[in-house]
Image (tube, grey):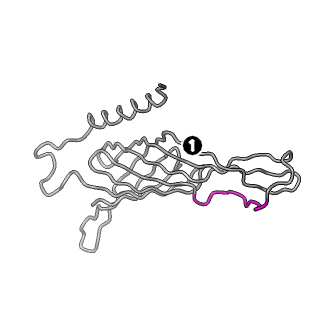
Amino acid sequence: MKFRYLKYVIMLIGIFCSSALFSQTKIDNEYPEDEEYDWVYLNLDLGYGSRGIGGALGFRYSFFGLGVSATGFATDIPNTSPYTPSNQANLVEKKYPSNTVCLDFFGYYDLDEVSLFANIGYYASVDSILSWDKQEHVYYRSGGVTQAGLCYGLGAQIPLTFIDESNVRLEQLVGGIGYHSKLGLYIRIAYRW
């Protein structure tokens, strides 16, 4: 039996253990009584990378979180011919990224106003293989390649503070930026519930 993914499982366990060690547990009288420390955040991520435009939804509670993302929107895949190629010798295959779905586990570490986060997860993707006919200058659909594996990322987020008409601070929104190995560079808007 191969232990192909053992190092990734050990790395995932290490992330969760380090999150537990660095979690900010509440000590009596450390925070004002009217302020609750463990909020739930709902996250929305929008990004762009080598696999096209993507988005993610997720949540955060305390120092951990879970997210689901999908990429492959607005990719640059050429149109294909519905006919079968007449001469197989003139074909050159090219691979184009299509759709990817990721499930990520997040670990958060809060510094004064900034929250740092890292994630590790699992992805599944389908890439289109097109054959280019050099003689007729037409693409033909040749099939697809399915891949799966581990994905990762990191980023930071800060509260977006607004003051309303009655001089009350509104701190329900959080903004951030991050990098994900499949989603690419992304921005995050989170709502503190």
Q: Please tell me whether residue 74 belongs to the stretch shown in magenta.
A: yes
Q: Nearer the viewer, residue 45 or 9?
A: 9
- Circle 1 is placed at which residue position? 147
Residue 23, given in percent of the width and then of the height, sits at 25, 39
In percent of the image, x 32 and y 51: which residue is there? Answer: 60
- Residue drawn where x is 53% and y is 49% of the image: 184
In magenta, the rendered stretch is: 73-83
Q: Is residue 7 left or right of residue 94?
A: left
Residue type at mark 1 is Gln
Quarter of the image where one finds residue 52: bottom right
Element at label 1: strand
Describe residue 135's horizontal placement relative to residue 83 as left or right: right
- Residue in the image at 83% along x and 47% along y: 88
Q: Main secondary structure of the magenta part?
A: loop
Q: Is residue 115 magenta?
A: no
Asked if 16 appears above or below 112 in the picture, the reply is above
User: Going by the image, does 93 lie left or right of 163?
Assistant: right
